[in-house]
Amino acid sequence: MKLKELDQRELREEFMRQEGLCMVSHGVYAPPDVFDGRTRISEYEWMPRWLEYNFRKHADVNDDVWKEVSENFHEKVYSLTSYPWHLKRIVKQVKGEKVLNIGTGSSPNLNLALIARGKTVWAVDISPTMLLQAVKTYWHHNLRYQLLDARTGFRDHHYVPDQVDTVLAVNSILPERREDVDHMLSEAYYMLREGGRFIGIFPEYHCHMEARDRFGARLQIDETNLRIYDTVGWQCVQTRKTIERHLTAAGFSNLRSEEIQLNTEPEKEMLGELYGIKGDFSFVELLVIADKT
Ligand SMILES: C[S@@+](CC[C@H](N)C(=O)[O-])C[C@H]1O[C@@H](n2cnc3c(N)ncnc32)[C@H](O)[C@@H]1O
């Protein structure tokens, strides 16, 4: 998907008109509570409304794949962030104050946990519909939502490199083409400061094979390219070896990985139903941590 550019200035002016807000000077807007204008509302009211408006407009022209699944995402797609014990395990590894959350999705859980720990978060996603759902649920002035394709996005948006202490990607580096795993990781590397940390969660390939071959899971697997057909199409998944190769190619060092077992009853029940699994089976995801040294 290639994001189509909308004229942000036009959108902003339309929004301001609809909301009865003013422009401070030509092309310059400020939060309404610093205006002398008619309406005084706080940034807390104004900003989420603007983001909602903006993402809805983008969703009308831009979204294809995620539109279907973004509503009630957690009923349709398994998300690690719905389970407090997994969430805790991820957040515990976060280093420093500035965090980039790649492919934030519609759920507020991870961002909430980070903000509660005093972090500043850039939450980016390629899907305006996902961002629309996210901002409807949660907004905070230390949480900046951004519509962006993480395969190329940070440089395109003139983000300053070496900015963040931690980059998180929870089941969001799942592109169709394997070379895009490299592109996304090298963008993550670009954004991290020296000494910064990458934390990624990836679906593990071998357990999908086992789920299909031994437990009858409804899964289409591309054994040549290690891809699974899931949710929105073909997605590259990882083994410990493949993700190590990708991270090393992107420049990372001090790689470590551990397996996360999705083996509690609610998880097994959800995944079992989702994939039509017969018997007692747990999926595995890889928690991978690496440094920019
Ligand atoms: C499976 S969902 C995971 C969402 C969230 N991290 C979670 O764990 O609940 C994958 C998310 O990654 C986003 N995504 C996929 N490709 C992306 C890209 N190239 N740039 C930014 N976000 C992307 C999707 O729009 C979607 O919201």
Image (spheres, rainbow, N blue to C red):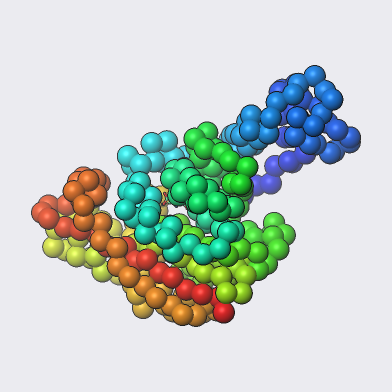
- Out of 51 and 35, give the one closest to the viewer: 35
Residue positioned 40% across, 69% down in the render = 288
- Out of 65 and 253, give the one closest to the viewer: 253
Residue positioned 75% across, 34% down in the render = 31
- Residue 250 is situated, as x and y percent measured from the top left of the image, at 54, 76
- Residue 88 is situated, as x and y percent measured from the top left of the image, at 37, 55
Relative to 270, is 151 above or below? Answer: below
224 horizontally vs 183: left or right:
left
Residue positioned 60% across, 38% down in the render = 55
- Seen from this angle, which residue lies furthest right? 25
36 horizontally vs 219: left or right:
right
Quarter of the image for residue 28 reads: top right
Q: Quadrant of the C terminus?
A: bottom right
- Out of 177 and 41, give the one closest to the viewer: 41
Residue 91 can be seen, yes or no: yes
Residue 125 can be seen, yes or no: no
- Residue 57 is situated, as x and y percent measured from the top left of the image, at 62, 35
- Residue 118 is situated, as x and y percent measured from the top left of the image, at 55, 51
Relative to 78, is 182 above or below? Answer: below
269 horizontally vs 245: left or right:
left
Quarter of the image for residue 226 reads: bottom left
Residue positioned 28% across, 58% down in the render = 220
